[in-house]
């Protein structure tokens, strides 16, 4: 038990050291960590403790390990968020409705922020997506629908919103693989969704936050109705 406690303390030394180096600017995204042997010498701990800490940081998304090349700071937390939310879903700590409620709040805020921060180039790209959504195949529309929402989130310029929304989108895709396809396969729901998408983009062009609020709510009314319908089929 004593050895286990010591190992745990050594393990946290590595994480605390790396966090401190990032905080003082000695380590930045894309930079390589010191070698395991060097970290062990600096901190006065075993290489096994360093390896355990590195594995945990890799899982967390703070670093990426490249076999034979070393460990690099990446800050790629989306995968960790997806895994954590997936486990919460599997353990029945969250459900479809809660995920949709969170997405509604975040996408609303993303759209409102995008109104203030979006560039003309980003607006042009969204217009292009809207045009394709109205004329492309059902399979491509599923991809375009996801791209539209990602681009709006990206235009918010809020890194945290972007990461969480991407993770939520992935979790929804994992557990309801055909949700987008199901919505887009029905003429009426596709029409309502396309109308909501058009108004979302229009709110960005006209800087109309009232229209943004209305369009996002309309969008999620369609999604939530389909989620309810699909959940009834499963019961």
Image: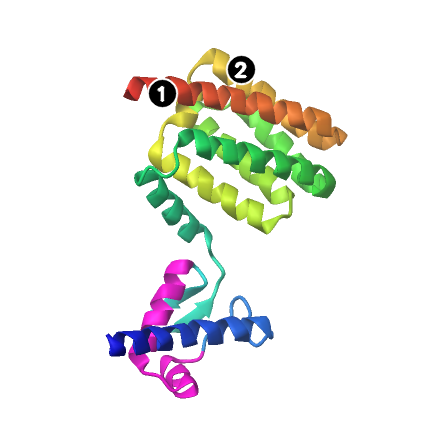
Q: Main secondary structure of the magenta part?
A: helix
Which numbered disc covers residue 230? 1
Which numbered disc covers residue 147? none
Query: Residue placed at 58% from the left, 71% from the top?
Result: 23
Query: Residue placed at 40% from the left, 30% from the top?
Result: 96
Confirm whether residue 92 shows in the render: yes
Observer-nearest residue: 86 or 135? 86
Mark positioned earlier in the residue sequence (2 or 1): 2
The image quadrant where one finds the C terminus is top left
Could you tell me if the residues under marks 2 and 1 are in contact, i.e. CB atoms within 8 Å? Answer: no
Q: Residues within 10 Å of mark 2 (few under 14, many from 20)?
A: some
Q: How many marks?
A: 2
Range of magenta residues: 34-60
Q: Is residue 162 magenta?
A: no
The image quadrant where one finds the N terminus is bottom left
Q: Kindly identify which residue carries mark 2.
A: 191
């Amino acid at each position: 038990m004593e050895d286990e406690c010591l190992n745990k303390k050594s393990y946290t030394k590595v994480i605390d050291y790396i966090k401190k180096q990032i905080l003082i600017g000695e380590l930045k995204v894309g930079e390589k960590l010191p070698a395991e042997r060097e970290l062990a010498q600096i901190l006065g701990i075993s290489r096994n403790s360093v390896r355990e800490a590195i594995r945990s940081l890799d899982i967390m998304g703070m670093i990426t390990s490249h076999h034979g090349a070393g460990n690099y700071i990446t800050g790629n937390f989306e995968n960790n968020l997806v895994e954590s939310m997936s486990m919460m879903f599997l353990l029945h700590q969250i459900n479809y409705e809660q995920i949709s409620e969170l997405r509604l709040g975040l996408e609303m805020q993303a759209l409102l922020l995008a109104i203030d921060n979006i560039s003309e180039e980003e607006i042009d790209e969204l217009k292009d997506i809207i045009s394709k959504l109205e004329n492309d195949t059902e399979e491509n529309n599923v991809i375009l629908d996801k791209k539209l929402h990602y681009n709006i989130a990206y235009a918010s310029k809020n890194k945290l919103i972007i990461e969480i929304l991407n993770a939520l989108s992935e979790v929804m895709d994992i557990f309801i693989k055909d949700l987008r396809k199901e919505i887009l396969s029905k003429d009426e729901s596709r029409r309502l969704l396309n109308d909501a998408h058009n108004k979302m983009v229009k709110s960005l062009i006209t800087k109309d936050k009232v229209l943004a609020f209305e369009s996002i709510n309309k969008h999620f009314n369609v999604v939530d109705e389909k989620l309810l319908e699909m959940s009834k089929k499963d019961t």
